[in-house]
Image: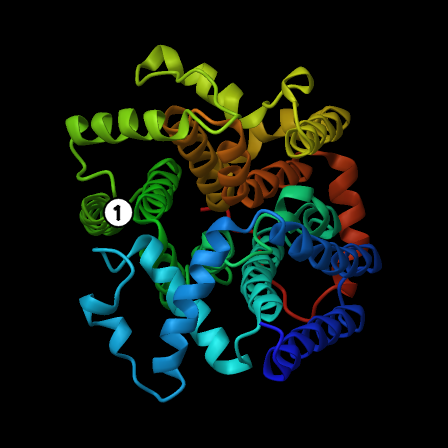
Amino acid sequence: MTSVEGLLGTGAGVVILLLIAIGVWRSRLPRLAKTLVVLGLGLRVVGIFGRQAIAADARVYFAWGERYAEYFSRLDFAPLWDPTLWRSAGWVGTNFIGYPAGAIIALIGPSWLGTFVGFTLLALVGFAAYGVAFHRAFPEIDPSRYWGWLFVFPSLWFWPSSIGKEAIMTLGLGVATLGLVGSGRRARWLVLGVGLAIVFVVRPQVAAVFMTAAILAYWLDFRSWSPARVVQGAAILAIGGTAIVYALDSSNAGGADLESLQEYTETNLQQTGQGGSEIEGVGLTPAAVPLAVVNVLFRPFPWEAHNLSAAVSALEILLMWGILWVRRRQLYGLARIWRRHRVVRFGVVFVAIYTVALGLNFANLGLIARQRTLMLPLFFLVVEAGALAVPAARQAASRFRPGYSRGRHPAVPA
């Protein structure tokens, strides 16, 4: 890890981060957005060093990446299809993380820190995709606040700055969201498919949540039905439903039937209800849903913070809801506009399903804080979309819009 080759790889990663910072500063983003993004890049360096302090999973992924890198460096891709070389019995899931780790190590050398930087860069692509998707969906809104959430919110610069699933999932979900938004009124199916494929090979069940939210977002628009639209909707529902069942069958859930999902949930609660941050499992009943939502969106409470990690998590939750309380007019406005915008409908449904599923399946506040990062970019997208319902924000947008980008992308109302 301290070889000359490894040091060169680390140096290359740092240079790339600096070049990204320079490129952002010279871009046509609003000045506040540029400042927040550059600040976020610096915070991710802090996140890289912080994540190394709790790098148990990362060490395993790095070790497997070194094994795969030996093959990839001589253009032998047998680990992709030879089950005897896999880390686990399945190709998807934990085993997959060794492939991007191996590719990065084959490219830069066996650099522990450099591989952290490589995964951080992959996550940055996902965050950038979210930012572009937001602008294309809502060109009327100054994107500075949304970029601020993406790049400065602690969980989003800490957890994905490591060798692990969070970085790859952030990449996949960001690209899939950009594909769903597309340009104008139509999705970019190829981009959407690539993003979903990345999500699927890491966590098929999250791909199922994404597809479910996309389908429901389509069907929640009742303003422009026609025979052709009904046929198109039925085709999307059939294809998406088949993909959802396949995703659940390919995951640890074991299937899409209620019995399999209940068994999967009970197993998850048993496995995650330990480690020092465990909480009482909420069960799998409709009555448990409100507590599941509280666990994901509001905990840990300050009095539950018994270590530094929990204290930081509690502080950021308090800060987040404090900011949202100050800007509560936007949240109230969402009740009036969310049905009119396909992207907002999708974000609301995704956040709702993911939050409930996470709260029902995990009984550990530390793990919930870590898994929550995958939902937060869409949660903040929905929050910032509420600016459409605030007249002052729309007036400010008319002054802002010409200076941001040459492209004009209308809002996506359907």
Q: Residue lying at the far top in this picture: please name it.
A: 287
- Residue 266: x and y in percent read 28, 24
Q: Secondary structure at mark 1?
A: helix
Residue nearest the observer in this picture, 275 or 212: 275
The answer to whether residue 177 is visible is no
- Residue 7: x and y in percent read 66, 78
- Residue 323: x and y in percent read 75, 30
Q: Is residue 270 above or below residue 345?
A: above
Quarter of the figure with the N terminus: bottom right
Number of marks in the rendered image: 1
Count residues near mark 1 (Cα–Cα under 10 Å), then give few for <14, some for 14-19, many for 20+. some
Q: Is residue 181 above or below residue 212?
A: below
Q: Residue lying at the far front in this picture: please name it.
A: 2
- Residue 54: x and y in percent read 58, 47
Q: At 46% across and 80% down in the image, what residue appears?
A: 106
Identity, as a three-letter code, of the amino acid under mark 1: Gly
Residue position marked by numbered label 1 in the rendering: 233
Residue nearest the observer in this picture, 182 or 207: 207
Q: Is residue 114 above or below residue 92?
A: below
The answer to whether residue 135 is visible is yes
Residue nearest the observer in this picture, 290 or 325: 290
Q: From the viewer's perspective, is 211 left or right of 257?
A: right
Q: At 78% across and 44% down in the image, what residue appears?
A: 395
Q: From the viewer's perspective, is 71 left or right of 323?
A: left
Residue nearest the observer in this picture, 97 or 378: 97
